Amino acid sequence: MNPNPRAGNRFSVTSIEAQQAEFPTVNKEDELKAKEFEVMMLQEENEGNTPRNILEEIVWNKDVEVAKMRERKPLSSLKKSLENAPPTRDFLGALREANRRTGFPGLIAEVKKASPSRGILREDFDPVEIAKAYEKGGAACLSVLTDEKYFKGSFENLEAIRNAGVKCPLLCKEFVVEAWQIFYARVKGADAILLIAAVLPDLDIKYMTKICKMLGLTALVEVHDEREMDRVLAIEGVELIGINNRNLETFEVDISNTKRLLEGERGQLIRQKDIIVVGESGLFTPDDIAYVQEAGVKAVLVGESIVKQSDPGKGISGLFGKDISL
Ligand SMILES: O=C(O)c1ccccc1NCC(=O)[C@H](O)[C@H](O)COP(=O)(O)O
């Protein structure tokens, strides 16, 4: 896969104003047809007209899904809903505070029912119960998957967790392809949102980060390799970077990825800029946590190893080798 497949295509954000405008001269039906046509054209660039990997497939589907959602709830109406959205909580502050309090990386515990690589992780999946158990177990923040097709998540889950009074700040774990989704996540109660460098060109990351700030959301910008890390480090205003140990194209997981990306000058620059780094994916044991902490992360994002436990809160103690709720 082209490491930056969407770069230069006309999905890119060219300005905040452009994203905020409603493109008044374009009829909605034509817009949707145009989006489907664009996706078709992108697909046709590939021989065989099939996505080359799972990430590409997810993104192609997301383009169409978002265009349909946006038709049902245009930006102008989302903006009105912002007035009734709950206040955002300090995601970065919660991670820093947990790191200071426990001496361990702050935990972002993921409410994850299923994944393309592992299938169903938990049959008896009650998102609110899991979120409460994570909070009780000492999680600093929660990550809520909202993609339905590939992860069996939903925005209803995000909203339900927020409305249930869970105090941990919430990350909307989505495949963001348009700024509209950031507004939507904010309305549904998110405090932070994921931006994936393998999906978004630099210009999009830059403007989407600004949109997040404008809305009071924290942007977690995710990278997987050195090239993506260098791209993101060159973007001003990025405060939180996730290093995903999972290659989203092949599903391969290797936690030494976190260490590699934090070595040498990159690590130095990250410390200089006071960026918080999150180690993501494939963390199962206290040794894994110690390994990524030694590499320089101040936070970790964990799903599978804790969501699969009968008591996901106790799963956190198992993961850290210690009760971190105290
Ligand atoms: O988890 C997957 O199979 C996956 C496939 C394609 C794109 C993204 C995917 N996962 C997102 C994540 O990065 C993880 O949910 C997150 O980092 C937690 O990972 P884990 O602790 O290994 O469940």
Image (cartoon, rainbow, N blue to C red):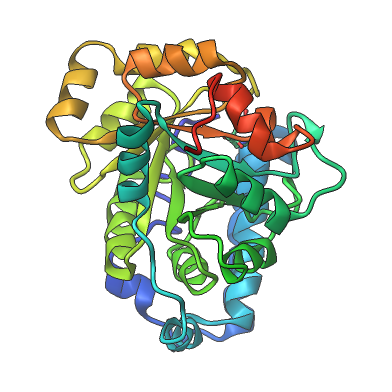
Give residue 31's position: percent from left, percent from top: 57, 76
Split into quadrants, the picture shows ligand 1 in the one at top right
In the displayed structure image, the side of residue 101 where residue 268 appears, left or right: left
Q: Using the image, determine if residue 201 lies above or below residue 3.
A: below
Q: Residue at 54% of width from left, 15% of height from top?
A: 286
Instruction: Say which of 287 and 201 sits in front.
Output: 287
Residue 313 appears at what percent x and percent y? 65, 39
* Direction front: furthest residue: 326
Residue 177 position, x and y percent, is 50, 55
**Which quarter of the figure is the N terminus placed in?**
top right
Foreground of the two, 51 or 300: 300
Q: Quadrant of residue 98?
A: top left
Instruction: Indicate the position of residue 251 as horizontal and vertical percent values.
Output: 65, 24
- Most foreground residue, 103 or 109: 103
Which residue is at a point 74% across and 46% down the rendered structure image?
150
Q: Residue at x 27, y 27 (%)?
A: 230
Q: Does residue 217 appear left or right of residue 136 in this picture?
A: left
Q: In the rendered image, is residue 51 in sight?
A: no
Q: Total number of numbered labels?
A: 0
User: Would you say residue 89 is visible in this rendering?
Assistant: yes
